[in-house]
Image (cartoon, helix red, strand yellow):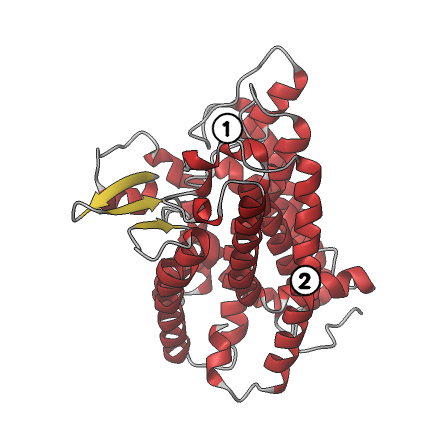
Amino acid sequence: MNQLKTKRIESLDILKGMVIIFMALDHTRDYFHVSSFLFDPADPEKSNLILFFTRWITHYCAPAFSFLAGISAFLVGRKKSKTELSSFLLKRGIWLIFIELVVVYFGWSFNIHFNHFGLLVIWSLGISMIFLAAIIHLSMKNILILSIVIIFGHNLLDNIHFDQNILWSILHERGNFILFDSIKIRVTYPIIPWIGVMSLGYYFGQFYNRDIRPEYRQKLFTNIGLACIAGFLLIRGINLYGNSDPWIAYDTFSQTLISFMDPSKYPPSLSYLLMTLGPAMLFLGNSENLKGRLAVFFATFGKVPFFFYIIHIYAIHLFAAILAELTGFGFESMVLNGFVSTNEQLIGFGVNLGWVYVVWLVILLLLYPMCKKFSHYKLNHKEKWWLSYF
């Protein structure tokens, strides 16, 4: 029997590490690739397969983060009462939203005016935790039902629109707004269905209890993963429900493939969630015995994902600013308003995709020792309550 031998579940850390490393690749592309300022890498008419799949692999990040955060909440809750866990999730959710609006904002922009905010992935995790603080008081059966209804049913809301309604946008529709005549808000991650993804993770956290046989868990996760992948192919293929952007058959196979493999992410459609959560479940079902240096490398990042997330943003942006200075664009061109690719002063800046991968690898190697050291610090100072927020 393949029992889990450590308090930390290595397969969860490995998956966290993998997806956050993929996320770093996408963020490196955002700031360094010369085409980032010209067109969307998922545009079938302008992109190519290598560029598209550089972007596509990062689609797995946000769903995995949300799902794994739900599992982690369940595991943390095994040592707490429901009231204590609710309090922890509420405080951590508020903390994450603060981090998104202050620390992450400045990392993306280097702009001291704080006049253009984005409700991005950290926001979605934070607001989902606030909802989860209430959801955990339901029975596990009802948590599963609620999660499935949200994930499978939310696309019924796709045809409901309220022009310039920020509350509706926060719930289910991507949008841009101006508050108080000067503060711009970009809602990129509406909260539906992210709260359902996190609560689904919480439900599946129970399968890591010690009374669950590892063989049963591994088989269950594998079968669910395969079913999700099959469901994605079926639903996406039918092209009727489960995605606000139907795929298009182009003249070339590569263009059609790009269109098919790029379901709506903002908000995440049913097709998108099946496409991403399926392989994540499949990985969890077949990775509990992974060993070796590569597994250790991924797990090191996965043990401190929040820490890595913050420092990698600043590292990428700083290196991009240095390159801008060296190539005549000037450091000040990297003081941004809004998302980096929308800043017209950067048109013509950047390097080819091969160099993007080089920069990405260099950043990972530079940040690895910091993550390893911080991971050891957390492990050896469990008595410090504030570390649970990092």
Q: Is residue 257 above or below residue 152?
A: above
Total number of numbered labels? 2
- Rendered image quadrant of residue 290: bottom right
Q: Where is residue 266 shown, x and y percent of the image?
A: 42, 39
- The residue singled out by tag 2 in the image is 366
Residue lying at 58% horizontally and 38% vertically, measured from the top left: 350
Amino acid at the residue labelled 1: Leu
- Residue sticking out furthest to the left: 180
As rendered, which of 314 and 7 lies closer to the eye? 314
Q: Where is residue 259 shown, x and y percent of the image?
A: 56, 24
Let me know if residue 22 appears in the view.
yes
Q: For the residue labelled by badge 2, is the local secondary structure a helix, a strand or a loop? A: helix
- Residue sticking out furthest to the right: 292
As rendered, which of 50 and 225 lies closer to the eye? 50
Q: Is residue 187 above or below residue 236?
A: below
Let me know if residue 60 appears in the view.
no
Task: Say which quadrant the N terminus sits in.
Answer: bottom right
Earlier-in-chain disc, 1 versus 2: 1
Residue lying at 69% horizontally and 44% vertically, measured from the top left: 357
Amino acid at the residue labelled 2: Leu
- The residue singled out by tag 1 in the image is 38
Spatial separation of the CA atoms under disc 1 and disc 2? 29 Å
Q: Where is residue 121 shown, x and y percent of the image?
A: 45, 52
- Residue sticking out furthest to the top: 251
Left or right of residue 203: residue 132: left
Residue lying at 50% horizontally and 40% vertically, measured from the top left: 329
Q: Is residue 320 above or below residue 294?
A: above
Left or right of residue 220: residue 93: left
Q: Is residue 32 above or below residue 195?
A: above
